[in-house]
Amino acid sequence: MATTSSSADHKATIIDGKAIAQIIRSEIASEVQDLSKKCGKVPGLAVVIVGNRKDSQSYVSMKRKACAEVGIKSFDLDLPEDVSQDEVISKVHELNANPEVHGILVQLPLPKHINEEKVLTEISIDKDVDGFHPLNIGKLAMKGRDPLFLPCTPKGCLELLSRSGVSIKGKKAVVVGRSNIVGLPVALLLLKEDATVTIVHSRTPDPEHIIREADIIIAAAGQPMMIKGSWIKPGAAVIDVGTNAVDDSSRKSGYRLVGDVDFHEGCKVAGCITPVPGGVGPLTVAMLLKNTLDGAKRVISQTTDDGENSHGQYTNNDDEEEYFYAPGSLSKLQPRKVVSKARWYAKTEMAKVTIQKGSLWKTAGIARSGIVYCSIEEVLFLAEIGALLLLDDCSASSSLDDIYIQRLQIVKAGVGGSSLRLKKQLKSLGYIVRRHGVPWSFKGANSNESVSGKCALESGSVDLESENKRSIIEMFSGMQINEAWGYPPSKAEIEAPERQCVGVPLKFCQVEHGRVSLFSFDRVELPVLP
Ligand SMILES: Nc1nc2c(c(=O)[nH]1)N[C@@H](CN(C=O)c1ccc(C(=O)N[C@@H](CCC(=O)O)C(=O)O)cc1)CN2
């Protein structure tokens, strides 16, 4: 996705926004197709334009074309330049009420006689795919709050950084410009990602000096080629949001587009840099499609989850809990009266519990910002005993086989190289992540008791390296703990300790992500995997 300039002077990696956006668009297209196949629903985006601004018309037509390409249904509303503010607002209300519309965007800028803030505030926050509603921006500005949607261009800037391997945490980021559409939200977003953020604007003295300190520069000032090569710290990541038309008599159109950064000079100094055109612009459109798809998925799952209210809050009913655990038949789903529900959350490779029933949640899962997440192992265990339903995008419950397949995919992905991603995700969930592949063992605790394995990750709340190691062994003193298997264990690997146990119920102890899961079996019946 990134090409390095071949000339000796041009060292920066050029971030190809067009190619990255195309990948994202094809990912979205296949998700839209899946959604339509599984749920018979198609995401819908209303694209509203007021007046005849040439640039706005061109952006709107790009958005409508992109919708068609990925299978999103676009609802086109072209209003005349002299339309009244009330009329625009009443159209927005109609779109808010239309269940086929999952996202509404009003192209900006609006004509002078229309108050932008008043119109944007009327868009339902559930459909605010531009992320400009004051509530969404407010949440973006607050610690520990997550907006329903992020503004498209800022989200695109971060997507470009992450897909180019640029980490943000702890970096010095300078945002040039403080607009509501880009400068301000991108600064907030970088702050959420733990950068140290400075905003440089038209009244900042000596901007050059501040910009030169930055590891990451987001240029969104709307000033053609304002940032010179000498303003850039060698190796910095430069994301140029500017799209400025400058006269160019050599072009048929009479103009060409340039960014806020002098690209030619920037290439000589920066570590990586986006071009204009072909950098951030295509990501703006791709993120709009992504927001629309996410909005549609959210609505579809909310309307099909029974028991879950429209805000995705949880119900808990301890009194009704009934155990239908039938020893000896663990591989079969055990019906229970009280079943919790969860959804797979690909971002963290964990299931997000949407309905908690019973007291099992006092010990199961991990809570982060009031939401309980379960590892695939816990999902599998709870699904096996009939205490949890894992729902897919259409709220259909996944079969045990599906969950096993999901687990295998995760295991494979971990081995195949996405472990770094997993590590990052676990870190974001609050785990303390240790070095990979460092085995730990309890040599000498008891000749019969040795635990070893590839415990690479450690939970913040369970310090497996200290006295807890010993106490786990002591707690299960009657238990024989064997070498950990690779995942998943084969039938033969389970049968060996099973034979050794001669009638004593077998305990399967799994150490993963620094969490110890203990499963007790009378008899092991491995399900036949497809
Ligand atoms: N309601 C909104 N209005 C506006 C937004 C927005 O996100 N929501 N952003 C900008 C304009 N914009 C999208 O609307 C936008 C700008 C640029 C591009 C883009 O792809 N640019 C291309 C060059 C295109 C050309 O040649 O003219 C590029 O940079 O490669 C897409 C969308 C203001 N209004």
Image (tube, grey):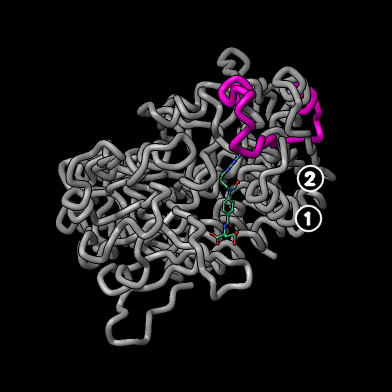
Are the residues flagged by discs 1 and 2 in contact, CB closer than 8 Å? yes
| Location of residue 237 by image quarter | bottom left
Q: Which residue is mark 2?
A: 74
For the residue labelled by badge 1, is the local secondary structure a helix, a strand or a loop?
helix
Residue picked out by circle 1: 68
In the foreground, 379 or 117: 117
Q: How many marks?
A: 2
* Mark 2 secondary-structure assignment: strand
Q: Residue at x 24, y 51 (%)?
A: 171
The tag earlier along the polypeptide, 1 or 2, is 1
Residue found at x 33% / y 62%:
483
The residue carrying pointer 2 sits among few (fewer than 14), some (14 to 19) or many (20 or more) residues within 10 Å by Cα, namely many
Q: Which residues are magenta?
A: 93-121
Amino acid beneath label 2: Ser
Q: Nearer the viewer, residue 67 or 169?
A: 67
Residue 118 x/y as whole percent: 60, 19
Q: Quadrant of residue 99?
A: top right
